[in-house]
Image (cartoon, helix red, strand yellow):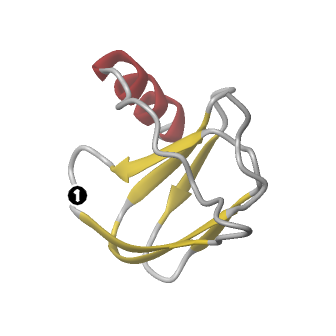
Amino acid sequence: MALPSVRQTLHCTQGSGLVVTRDGAVIMMRPGDTVHTPAGEEHWHGAVPDSLMSHLAMVEQLNGESAIWLEPVSDAEYTSAHSQAAR
C-alpha cells in the first residue's frame, strides 16, 4: 500500500500527549504545541496515561488523497512509547 503524499498537522489544545513514528521516535505534546508529520510518515498520537488530551488534527487533501488511518497500536507499543517519553 502506497501512503499518500499529504501530511498531517496536530495541535495540542489541552492536556499532554505523544506523537510516535513507526520507527519509534517519540515527540511529547503539551498545550500550544504543534507537530507536523511529513507526507507518507506512519505515526500514531494519543494522550499520556495520566492526562486527557484535546487536539486539532488537520489533514491535507490532494487530488482526492488524504491521511490513511491504520490499525490501533498495541498496549505494548503504547507502554513502550510512554516509557521513552519519561526519560
Q: Position of residue 53 (x, y in %)?
A: 29, 65
Q: Position of residue 8 (x, y in %)?
A: 62, 64
Q: In terms of depth relative to the viewer, which is nearer, 65 or 56?
A: 65
Q: Residue at x 53, y 55 (%)?
A: 28
Q: Which residue is drawn at 53% across and 31% down?
A: 84
Q: Mark 1 points at which residue?
A: 51
Q: Which residue is drawn at 44% across and 23% down?
A: 80
Query: How many numbered marks, from 0 up?
Result: 1
* Quarter of the image that includes the N terminus: top right
On screen, residue 35 versus residue 4, left or right, reads: left
Q: Which residue is drawn at 50% across and 83% down?
A: 32
Q: Which residue lies furthest to the front in this view?
A: 63
On screen, residue 4 versus residue 34, left or right, reads: right
* Quarter of the image that includes the C terminus: top right
Instruction: Please say if 78 is above or below 30.
Output: above
On screen, residue 37 versus residue 59, left or right, reads: right
Instruction: Please say if 35 is above or below 31.
Output: above
Q: Position of residue 61 (x, y in %)?
A: 65, 70
Disc 1 marks which amino acid?
Ser
* Residue 43, image quadrant: top right
* Residue 7, image quadrant: bottom right
Secondary structure of residue under mark 1: loop
Q: Where is residue 66 in the image (x, y as percent from the top left)?
A: 60, 60
Q: In terms of depth relative to the viewer, which is nearer, 83 or 20?
A: 20
On screen, residue 16 versus residue 42, left or right, reads: left
Q: Which residue lies furthest to the top in this view?
A: 76
